[in-house]
Amino acid sequence: MATDRAGTVDTPRGRYAGLSADQRRNQRRDRLRAAALELIAEEGLTGLKVRGLCARAGLNDRYFYESYSHTDRLLYELVEEQLAEVVAAVMGVIAVAPADTRVRLRAVVEAGVAAIADHPARRRLTIEMQTTDDLRHRRTELVALVAQVMLDQGRELLGEDAVRGMHAELAARTVAHGGLEILAEWLRGELDIDRAQLVDFLVAMILTSAQITTTVQREMAAG
């Protein structure tokens, strides 16, 4: 009869009574994932260690390795899941927001900021998203995704002619990079502004991105 750290007996008479082996394994995996999010929120990525993770989940250390070979694998899975939820929240707003550029943009920015800032683990992941090679790679992919959404929305709301060509793509990537970094600085407490001011700035930055394209084209023509 096996007992985990929380004193739970892993037999049909314990927490997992009536469950199959796969169901018991999935429950332990879910407990590890929930514990990992708690530790990331409280301590950052440095708190993601097998012993502390299993203690928080109320499991014997050996149960970690039935689901993951390393904490990096667990972290990657959590990042993918959390980013997918943020993207889903933003796309859900896009689907119902009116076809008014300013109104839709503000709704999307507010939803994106809230989806991250109001979730402790996502806040910490955003702050630490350049601390490992894997996270930096994921951030680069996120920038590309945000830029593409901006371009798609620009074409839908402003027309194809208003958002096309290499300069529009570069402007979108510049705004995506800058917006994510400004958000991270705000989450770290480095910017003396409130959420409403942050949203106002991000909305203005995106709205003026079209001017970047126009200015570049003018300068290239003059040169």
Image (cartoon, rainbow, N blue to C red):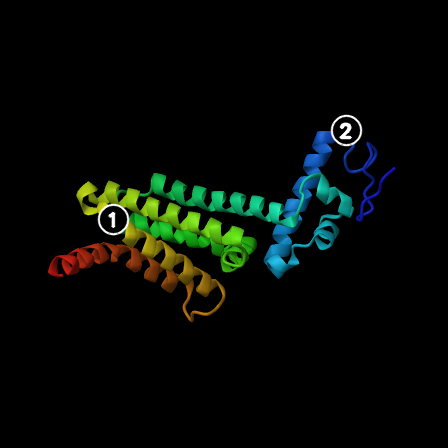
Which of pointers 2 and 1 lies earlier in the amino acid sequence? 2
The numbered dot on residue 73 is none
Percent position of residue 61, x then y: 76, 47
Percent position of residue 202, x then y: 34, 59
For residue 59, say whether it is visible.
no
Tell me if label 2 and label 1 are in contact, CB under 8 Å.
no
Percent position of residue 116, x then y: 48, 53
The relative height of residue 92 versus residue 136 in the rendered view (above or below) is above
Q: Which residue is mark 1?
A: 166
Q: Which residue is mark 2?
A: 18
Of residues 91 and 44, which is closer to you in this image? Answer: 44
Which amino acid type corresponds to the residue marked 2 in the rendered image?
Gly
For residue 22, say whether it is visible.
yes
Residue in view at x 72 percent, y 39 percent: 66
Residue in view at x 33 percent, y 62 percent: 201
Which amino acid type corresponds to the residue marked 1 in the rendered image?
Met
Q: Give the position of the C terminus as an image quadrant.
A: bottom left
Percent position of residue 219, x then y: 16, 60
Q: Is residue 10 left or right of residue 179?
A: right
What is the C-alpha distance between the residues marked 2 and 1? Answer: 59 Å
Q: Is residue 164 left or right of residue 183?
A: left
Q: Which structural element holds mark 1?
A: helix
Residue in view at x 64 percent, y 47 percent: 34
Residue in view at x 71 percent, y 44 percent: 64
Crowd around label 1: few <14 · some 14–19 · many ≥20 (10 Å): few
